[in-house]
Image (cartoon, rainbow, N blue to C red):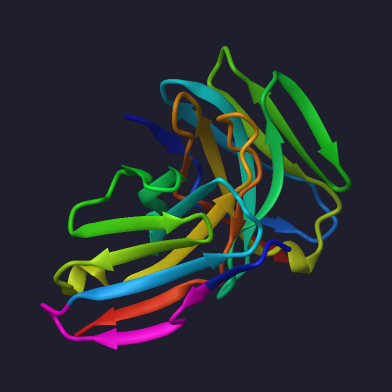
Amino acid sequence: DAGITQSPRHKVTETGTPVTLRCHQTENHRYMYWYRQDPGHGLRLIHYSYGVKDTDKGEVSDGYSVSRSKTEDFLLTLESATSSQTSVYFCATNPGTGTIVTEAFFGQGTRLTVV
Amino acid sequence: GQSLEQPSEVTAVEGAIVQINCTYQTSGFYGLSWYQQHDGGAPTFLSYNALDGLEETGRFSSFLSRSDSYGYLLLQELQMKDSASYFCAVSQGGTASKLTFGTGTRLQVTL
């Protein structure tokens, strides 16, 4: 299995506070992704990265920012947490064959609760 | 944009065969993949189709028709441990590669 570690695994935070979730990989994979998972919505793409300092928005990027300053780390920041951002967040990586994503590897998820 | 449609729930009996369909609308399509997720766990990769036709991996097979923007996952000889959620996902290429998931199909295997 790809070495993907998400931290923290669980977090409770207050509305209006900034929160940063970390995804760390040891596989030197090129592509990294942040998804949120909510009942009835499947996995929705927040942001993704196709290289160091190269990121792009997914379908639900409002209220989120990301940074990737080195290959192994992809950070997701909730700039001012809201209750609607209560969710399970998954990081995923893919080695990349050219620009095509085939098999993605997922971290174990971070359960975030905004109160 | 892109959209993927799957049935929300499917129920089947142990030992039976079940097919989970996925239709998609997307630009820059490169391939369709399938993932399994057990409750409380992370999604895990099952299969990937870039070309039309059937790909077989053990009890699981996946099919793609690019002209119909349609694919399916076929699970044979169902076992209780196959009870899980199954997601189709489309890969979009270009300068950056996106991976977009459907809303998932919850499969319940019964005795």
Image spot of residue B7 (x, y percent):
51, 45
- Please say whether residue A97 is visible from this viewpoint: yes
Which residue is outermost to the top? Answer: B67
Taking the magenta stretch, the answer to whether it contains residue A99 is no
Residue sitting at x 56%, y 42%: B88
Q: Where is residue A93 in the image (x, y as percent from the top left)?
A: 56, 53
Rendering quarter of residue A14: bottom left
> In the picture, residue B63 is in which quadrant?
top right
Q: Is residue A108 above or below residue B104?
A: below
At x 78%, y 27%, the residue is: B54
User: Against B81, is B64 above or below?
Assistant: above
Seen from the viewer's position, the closer of residues A82 and B7 is: A82
Q: Going by the image, does B79 lie left or right of A48?
A: right
Residue at (54% x, 40% y) in the render: B89
Who is closer to the viewer here, A79 or B39? Answer: A79
Give the magenta-colored segment's residue range.
Answer: A6-17
The quarter of the image holding the N terminus of chain B is: top left
Image quarter in which the C terminus of chain B is found: bottom right
Answer whether residue B111 is visible to the viewer in this image.
Answer: no
Between B40 and B20, the residue placed more toward the observer is: B40
x, y percent for residue A23: 47, 67
Q: Does the magenta stretch include residue A7?
A: yes
Q: Is residue A87 left or right of residue A70?
A: left
